[in-house]
Image (cartoon, rainbow, N blue to C red):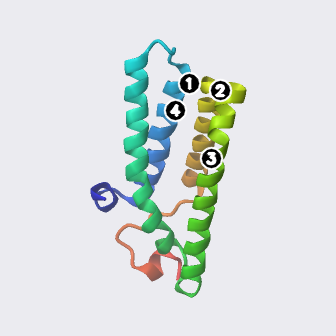
Amino acid sequence: IWLTIKLPRRVFLIGSFAVTCVSLVALSVLPESATLAMIVAFGIFTLTMSAFSNLVGVFPPECFPTEVRACGVGLAIACSRLGSAVGTFLLPLGIAGFGFHVTMVVLAAVLLVGMIVSIAWAPETRHLTLNEASGG
């Protein structure tokens, strides 16, 4: 929560994508014998993802105009929950079918796409009123 307050939203969003992506790439390239390094990479991923999840309650409301804010936030949260459900279902299938390392590369690629999309379209909403942030 402290990072959500202190960092610019766009920097926090893009930086979180970058750190989680690099963490998963590290997990995908580390040999299974590098247990301590894998634990550290997973710990960095988990801590970053926990901090990153705080943006869900802050960033979407700032991006939608007042007229559609509730619907926009609802849609964003629904998509997030759908992604979580699909990911929870597919992760063990991916590991069983393709192996741990390949699955981590695929997940890192998804995060890389999220980072690229954020670089291209995520606005900076820090220090703006809701109307200013949503383009209203």
Query: How much space separates mark 1 and mark 3, taking CA atoms?
Result: 17 Å
Residue at 40% x, 59% y: name it: 54
Please say if the residues under marks 2 and 1 sit with CB atoms less than 8 Å apart. Answer: yes
| Comes first in the chain, label 3 or label 2 | 3
Q: Secondary structure at mark 4?
A: helix
Q: Amino acid at mark 4?
A: Leu
Please say if the residues under marks 1 and 4 sit with CB atoms less than 8 Å apart. Answer: yes
* Residue picked out by circle 2: 102
Q: Is residue 15 left or right of residue 108?
A: left
Q: Which mark is residue 24?
A: 4
* Residue picked out by circle 3: 87
Q: Residue furthest bottom?
A: 67
Residue at 43% x, 15% y: name it: 34
Q: Amino acid at mark 3?
A: Gly
Residue 2: image x %, image y %?
27, 57
Residue at 59% x, 49% y: name it: 114
Of discs 3 and 4, which sits in the foreground? Answer: 3
Give the quarter of the image for residue 92. top right
Q: Dot 1: within a 10 Å radius of its alpha carbon, few (fewer than 14), some, or many (20 or more) residues? A: many
Q: Is residue 50 left or right of residue 135?
A: left
Is 30 placed above or below 59 here?
A: above
